[in-house]
């Protein structure tokens, strides 16, 4: 039993690569059709966000069975711990019928949860959680980031500062325990937790391409999203703009346009810029994992050869 985790920056072609890989694996060994795919994207799990989160197309989902795609409403709370628990149950079932399962996505915490297990962190007092949520809603993210910088400068220096759920989670732990969130996380010298043993093998594949090619792909994909109706999708979701699920590149910039802060052309420019910045942060995260073997998105044959050797 082998889980193949496909990682990489936004716009690199992970989804297409994963679908082609799943189909190819289905032609080999004892597989019954294509290998199933589990999404490790923290936003693709939500309904009504198909364009902005670049969910697999209808054709791709017909070709390969996908899980954790558009099966939650944006106002549903779905944490990384929820994902780990549900994904492990799903894998237990899938591995009774499949030799391989493919996981694909760019959310580093989801990928770590699936492959390594989550840190054991304290339960949070509901009053702390509710107070921070109200502060986010009423005052925005900036004061929360200032508090995080004061309480945990180490985590502040590495966290995605455009990702409210991660900022909120770190502040919840800081307030609950009185110690920095970074001191309790796996991999920190203060933590004694080791990786959780999984009942299956894991092979990690990274999708890599030259920076200028990646950025050109990102810009082109944003243009395609706009042509496909991203503005209309964002308008429908606008009443829910305060939800953590909507604090996402694409929707956030278009909400600024809807608020009259700048033009539509400027919003598109900001989506492209912020997508490129997000891709850079993702690459920084993934480069720290020396278990990842990197391939260009067109090099499916090379990835198959590597998987065959490792299996």
Image (cartoon, rainbow, N blue to C red):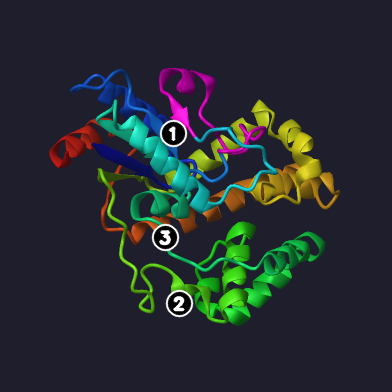
Q: Where is residue 39 in the image (x, y as percent from the top left)?
A: 46, 38
Quadrant showing the N terminus: top left
Q: Nearer the viewer, residue 90 or 22?
A: 90
Mark 1, residues whose alpha carbon is within 10 Å: few (<14), some, or many (≥20)?
many
Q: Does the magenta stretch include residue 177?
A: no
The residue where tag 1 is placed is 15
Q: Residue 153 appears at what percent x and percent y?
A: 54, 79
Residue under numbered circle 2: 183
User: Mark 3 and 2 residues: CB-CB less than 8 Å, in contact?
Assistant: no
Figure quadrant of residue 131: bottom right
> Quarter of the image holding residue 285?
bottom left
Q: In the rendered image of this protein, does residue 202 appear above or below residue 50?
A: below
Evaluate whether residue 106 shows in this view. no
First in residue order: circle 3 vs circle 2: 2
Over which residues does the magenta segment extend? 45-67
Disc number for residue 284: 3
Callout 1 secondary element:
helix
Task: Pick out the residue farthest to the left.
Answer: 309
In the displayed structure image, the side of residue 212 where residue 269 appears, left or right? right
> In the visual, does 195 lie left or right of 38?
left
Q: How far apart are marks 3 and 2 (CA)?
A: 20 Å
């Amino acid at each position: 039993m082998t889980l193949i985790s496909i990682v990489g920056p936004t716009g690199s072609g992970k989804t297409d690569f994963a679908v082609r890989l799943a189909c190819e694996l289905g032609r080999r060994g004892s597989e019954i059709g294509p290998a199933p795919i589990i999404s490790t994207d923290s936003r693709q799990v939500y309904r009504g966000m198909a364009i902005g989160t670049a969910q697999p197309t209808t054709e791709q989902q017909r070709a390969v069975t996908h899980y954790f795609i558009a099966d939650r409403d944006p106002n549903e709370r779905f944490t990384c711990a929820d994902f780990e628990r549900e994904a492990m149950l799903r894998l237990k079932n899938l591995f009774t019928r499949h030799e391989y399962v493919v996981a694909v996505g760019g959310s580093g915490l989801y990928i770590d949860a699936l492959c390594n297990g989550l840190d054991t962190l304290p339960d949070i007092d509901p009053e702390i959680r509710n107070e921070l949520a109200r502060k986010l809603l009423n005052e925005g993210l900036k004061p929360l980031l200032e508090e995080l910088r004061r309480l945990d400068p180490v985590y502040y220096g590495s966290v995605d500062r455009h990702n409210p759920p991660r900022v909120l989670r770190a502040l919840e732990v800081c307030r609950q325990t009185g110690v920095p969130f970074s001191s309790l996380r796996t991999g920190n010298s203060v933590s004694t937790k080791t990786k959780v043993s999984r009942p299956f093998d894991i092979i990690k594949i990274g999708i890599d391409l030259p920076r200028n090619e990646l950025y050109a792909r990102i810009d082109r994909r944003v243009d395609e999203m706009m042509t496909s109706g991203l503005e209309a999708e964002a308008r429908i979701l606008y009443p829910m703009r305060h939800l953590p699920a909507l604090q996402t590149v694409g929707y956030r910039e278009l909400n600024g346009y809807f608020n009259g802060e700048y033009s539509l052309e400027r919003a598109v420019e900001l989506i492209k810029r912020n997508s490129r910045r997000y891709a850079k942060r993702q690459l920084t995260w993934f480069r720290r994992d020396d278990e990842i073997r990197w391939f260009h998105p067109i090099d499916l044959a090379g990835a198959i050869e590597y998987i065959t050797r490792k299996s």
